[in-house]
């Protein structure tokens, strides 16, 4: 059973179309750029929500105290 399994794995790996070096570099750069873009977007939302939260607590404390 194990021999048949490994023969199948070897056969399937021969069918794989591996990316070229240029494709690999382009895809890696794209992934890094998208991760950075999303990180900046999340940072922006976080800063906006932090400012709103601070303003809300200041408003509440001024009304109460």
Image (cartoon, rainbow, N blue to C red):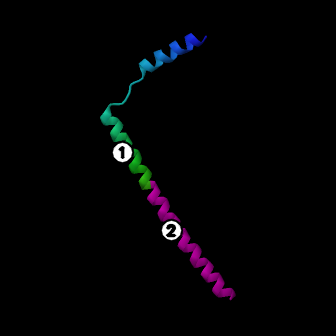
Please state the extent of the stretch shown in magenta in the rendering: 38-65
The residue that mark 1 highlights is: 29
Quarter placement of the C terminus: bottom right
Per the image, the residue denoted by label 2 is: 47
Across and down, in percent, residue 25 comes to 33, 39
Q: Position of residue 28 (x, y in %)?
A: 38, 42
- Residue occupying the far bottom of the picture: 65
Instruction: Give the x, y percent position of residue 33.
Output: 38, 50
Other residues around mark 2 within 10 Å, as few (<14) / some (14–19) / many (≥20): few
| Mark 1 element type | helix
Q: Residue at x 38, y 27 (%)?
A: 18
Question: Which of the two residues, 20 or 56, is positioned nearer the viewer here?
Answer: 20
| Left or right placement of residue 50 versus residue 61 in this view | left
Q: Secondary structure at mark 2?
A: helix
In this rendering, would 60 be left or right of 35? right
In the picture, residue 19 is in which quadrant?
A: top left
């Amino acid at each position: 059973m194990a021999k048949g399994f490994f023969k199948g794995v070897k056969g399937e790996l021969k069918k794989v179309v591996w990316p070229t070096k240029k494709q690999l570099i382009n895809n890696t750069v794209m992934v890094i750029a998208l991760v950075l873009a999303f990180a900046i977007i999340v940072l922006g939302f976080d800063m906006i929500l932090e400012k709103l939260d601070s303003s809300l607590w200041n408003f509440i404390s001024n009304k109460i105290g």
